[in-house]
Amino acid sequence: MEWTFLGEAIEWRGPAPYVFVPAPPGVAAEIREMSSRLSYGWGCIPCKLMVGQTQVATALFPKDGTYLVPIRVSVQRAEGINVGDSVHVCLTVDV
């Protein structure tokens, strides 16, 4: 499955040095429907993330009714992402 969306990079007191992009409600609902087949524990879901020209493996994790997409510092630097920026995200999960 693949989802593409635009979201705002936020700061959260999770694992540093990441910023996060919350999945929009519709995307989060679709992910949640499949989460029991996709999660490897604690609700985390492995995925491939494409931001701009940068692709990395990561894992979504549930937070406050949505899923947060972690943007590691190497991706932030490569794509010039800062807190408050709009980020075009493409997520792929293996079903």
Image: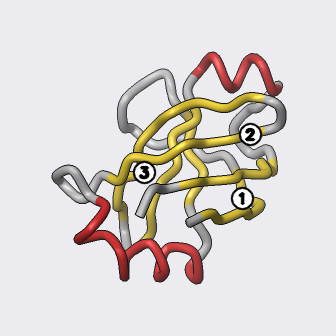
Q: CA distance from mark 2 to mark 3?
A: 14 Å
Q: CA distance from mark 1 to mark 2?
A: 11 Å
In this rendering, would 84 be left or right of 49?
Answer: right
**Residue at the far left in the pictured view:** 41
Q: Residue 26, percent across and down? A: 58, 83
Q: Residues within 10 Å of mark 3 (few under 14, many from 20)?
A: many
Do callouts 2 and 3 mark residues in contact (Cβ within 8 Å)? no
Q: Give the labeled residue for mark 2.
A: 51
Depicted 28 relative to depicted 42: above or below: below
Q: Give the labeled residue for mark 3.
A: 60
Which dot, 1 or 3, sits closer to the camera? 3
Q: Give the labeled residue for mark 1.
A: 7
Quarter of the image containing the N terminus? bottom right
Say what amino acid the circle numbered 3 marks: Leu
Q: Nearer the viewer, residue 20 or 41?
A: 41
Q: CA distance from mark 1 to mark 3?
A: 14 Å
Depicted 79 relative to depicted 1: above or below: above
Q: Quadrant of residue 59?
A: top left
Q: Which residue is at 74% across, 32% downward?
A: 82
